[in-house]
Image (spheres, rainbow, N blue to C red):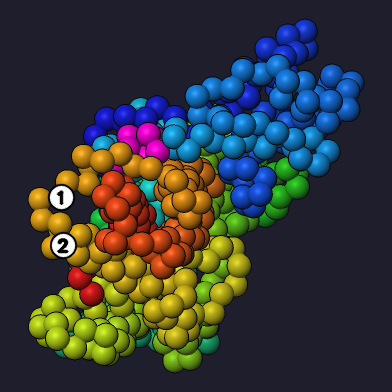
């Protein structure tokens, strides 16, 4: 959605602005600017469509009872066109009932808008999204997979909101593992296995070398020597290192293509090598770094954090040093408004530490760590601590196979080629949605039954809903050839269609909030809720049998529901086959 925005604000933003004006009008003597006068959607329709709780906090400032504050607003505020009625509930909640006519007109505006009513809130702003970022040749663990799926959803959501997004795959392509790998590779590698399945072979070599380093001091010293040689530019080691990266990237890319993930930048840790000494010098010059037992650290006592290590006693640099260099490099080159990192929960301390060091260096760019817990996968797909690309491939294969069995059952008449294509979209969608529909910070267990359920909160359920809605539109065209739904206005006469219409109009607010809070699951919840409202609409109201005008209005609501579901799923990286 790159078209220029038709809507400059969402419904909540419009109503919140009105609330600000209303309070200012009613209480001109008191400065209420700092109060949260924001309006939010109600969860219970008996309290209207939207509500505002500001009377409670305003009451203190105004030295009045909350209910009296609310009453004064109800009595004296001017209602905008959108609002049919304003009333009070409980101790002073302001309940807003929107005009059904206004809702219907807004729906028509949204339908005519290529951006589905989503304002370009991110216009002119840049965000760098650092996600996936696996380590070359070390086992790729399940965290990288979640980071890829969640990061990509955040990527798509921000682009849709008009942000300039730079997706950067910050590969772990530098560090001590390469000493272990180079010596391990020369000693243990099987060239044929390396050709056939490079990552698997590199992982095997890495583990063998790592285990040996634990019991054999001489081996450990020798691996360090290889690392130093690599760092000093030794051509043989350099060539091996490049080959590790090239082979690994090729396999990562295969997975990314399969998952529909694209990066704008693939700058590994090694990209920042030349900057590390300068970063340390800068920290020293600013009096931030100090020696401690031969290492160089930045103390973070005031922030109640353990010190951030920036140079080891052997002169090598730390993970944090690279990350600080990366922030400095990115801010200088791209002037981003925010840099967002998506990793598993185990790195929280690391991010807190180097974010704090960046602040001490005077950097003001917003730095955000989006972390998630590790998902439990079915027995046998991954060990609890690690998985790898191969296993991820198998997981996706299994998803497609299971989906194919379902598609063959539900659509036996479909040509086999098309069945496979649908199964691919459904299987991959199921795996992604199982991940994205959960609060990232809660511990979840993946089960095939839940992921592939046709009747629960799952991707297949939503994909089927889209296809079914399309078939309603087809039926209309068959029964009423030449019928032009848009020639008739949208009307929201029945409470069920009003509920659906209202929900459709919430899309922009949900999307903005989900992006702002980095929570794709809020978008997933919304889509499921929308699909359920649709199904109640479809089951309870006559469609093709309704009188002319009502029928066309319903077909239009139907079309808008399908578009909203498709757009929302696409933002989660999930495809919607036209027919299932
Ligand atoms: N390569 C790291 C890992 O596998 C993740 C990197 C996350 N991004 C960053 N800038 N630190 O754990």
Q: CA distance from mark 2 to mark 1?
A: 9 Å
Check disc 2 and report the residue beneath it: 479
On whether residue 351 falls in the magenta region, the answer is no
Q: Residue at x 43, y 78 (%)?
A: 455
Residue 390 in view: no
Q: Is residue 497 above or below residue 226?
A: above
Image position, residue 541 (x, y; %)? 40, 61
Q: Residue at x 31, y 31 (%)?
A: 5
Q: Count neighbours of disc 2 (C-alpha within 10 A) and say few if under 14, some if 14 to 19, many if 20 or more.
A: few
Q: Any mark on residue 483, and which?
A: 1
Q: Is residue 367 above or below residue 14?
A: below
Side of 157 relative to 55 (left or right): left
Q: Quadrant of residue 406?
A: bottom left
Write down the region rendered in magenta.
Answer: 104-111
Q: Residue at x 54, y 47 (%)?
A: 517
On whether residue 108 falls in the magenta region, the answer is yes
Tell me the element at label 2: helix
């Amino acid at each position: 959605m790159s078209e220029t925005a038709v809507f400059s604000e969402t419904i909540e933003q419009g109503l919140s602005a009105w609330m600000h004006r209303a309070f200012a009008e009613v209480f001109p003597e008191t400065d209420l600017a700092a109060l949260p006068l924001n309006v939010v959607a109600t969860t219970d329709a008996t309290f209207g469509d939207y509500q505002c709780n500001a009377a409670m906090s305003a009451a203190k400032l105004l030295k009045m009872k909350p209910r009296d504050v609310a009453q004064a607003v109800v009595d004296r505020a001017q209602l905008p066109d959108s609002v049919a009625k304003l009333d009070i509930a409980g101790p002073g909640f302001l309940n807003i009932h929107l005009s059904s006519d206004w809702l219907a007109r807004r729906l028509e505006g949204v339908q005519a808008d290529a951006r589905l009513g989503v304002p370009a809130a991110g216009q002119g702003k840049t965000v760098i999204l650092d996600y996936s970022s696996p380590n070359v040749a070390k086992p790729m663990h399940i965290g990288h997979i979640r980071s890829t799926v969640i990061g990509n959803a955040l990527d798509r959501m921000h682009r849709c909101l008009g942000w300039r997004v730079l997706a950067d795959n910050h590969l772990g392509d530098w560090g001590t593992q390469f000493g272990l790998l180079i010596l391990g590779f020369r000693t243990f590698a099987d060239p044929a296995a390396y050709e056939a399945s490079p990552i698997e072979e590199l992982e095997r070599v890495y583990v063998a070398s790592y285990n040996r380093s634990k019991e054999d001091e001489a081996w450990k010293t020798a691996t360090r020597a290889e690392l130093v040689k690599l760092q000093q530019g030794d051509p043989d080691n350099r060539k091996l290192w490049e080959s590790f990266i090239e082979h690994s990237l090729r396999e990562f890319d295969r997975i990314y293509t399969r998952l529909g993930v694209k990066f704008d930048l693939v700058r590994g840790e090694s990209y920042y090598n030349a900057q590390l000494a300068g970063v340390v010098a800068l920290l020293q010059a600013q009096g931030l770094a100090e020696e401690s037992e031969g290492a160089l650290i930045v103390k973070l006592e005031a922030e109640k954090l353990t010190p951030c290590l920036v140079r080891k006693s052997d002169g090598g640099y730390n993970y944090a040093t690279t990350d600080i260099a990366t922030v400095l490099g990115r801010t200088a080159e791209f002037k981003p408004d925010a840099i967002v990192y998506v990793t598993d929960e185990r790195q929280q301390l690391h991010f807190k530490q180097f974010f704090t060091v960046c602040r001490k260096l005077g950097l003001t760019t917003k730095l955000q760590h989006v972390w998630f817990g590790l998902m439990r996968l079915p027995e046998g797909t991954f060990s609890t601590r690690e998985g790898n690309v191969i296993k991820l491939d198998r997981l996706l294969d299994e998803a497609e196979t299971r989906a194919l069995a379902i598609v063959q059952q539900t659509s036996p008449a479909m040509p086999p080629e098309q069945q496979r294509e649908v199964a691919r979209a459904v299987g991959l969608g199921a795996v992604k949605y199982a991940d994205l529909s959960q609060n990232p910070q809660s511990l979840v267990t993946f089960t095939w039954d839940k992921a592939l359920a046709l009747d629960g909160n799952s991707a297949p359920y939503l994909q089927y809903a889209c296809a079914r809605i399309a078939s309603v539109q087809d039926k209309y065209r068959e029964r009423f050839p030449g019928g032009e739904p848009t020639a008739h206005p949208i009307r929201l006469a029945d409470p069920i269609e009003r509920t659906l219409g209202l929900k459709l109009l919430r899309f922009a607010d949900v999307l903005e909030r989900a992006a702002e809070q980095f929570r794709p699951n809020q978008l997933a919840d919304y889509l499921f809720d929308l699909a359920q409202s649709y199904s109640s609409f479809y089951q309870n109201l006559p469609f093709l049998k309704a009188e002319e005008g009502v029928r066309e209005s319903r077909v239009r609501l139907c079309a808008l529901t399908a578009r909203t579901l498709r757009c929302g799923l696409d933002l989660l990286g999930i495809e919607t086959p036209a027919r299932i």
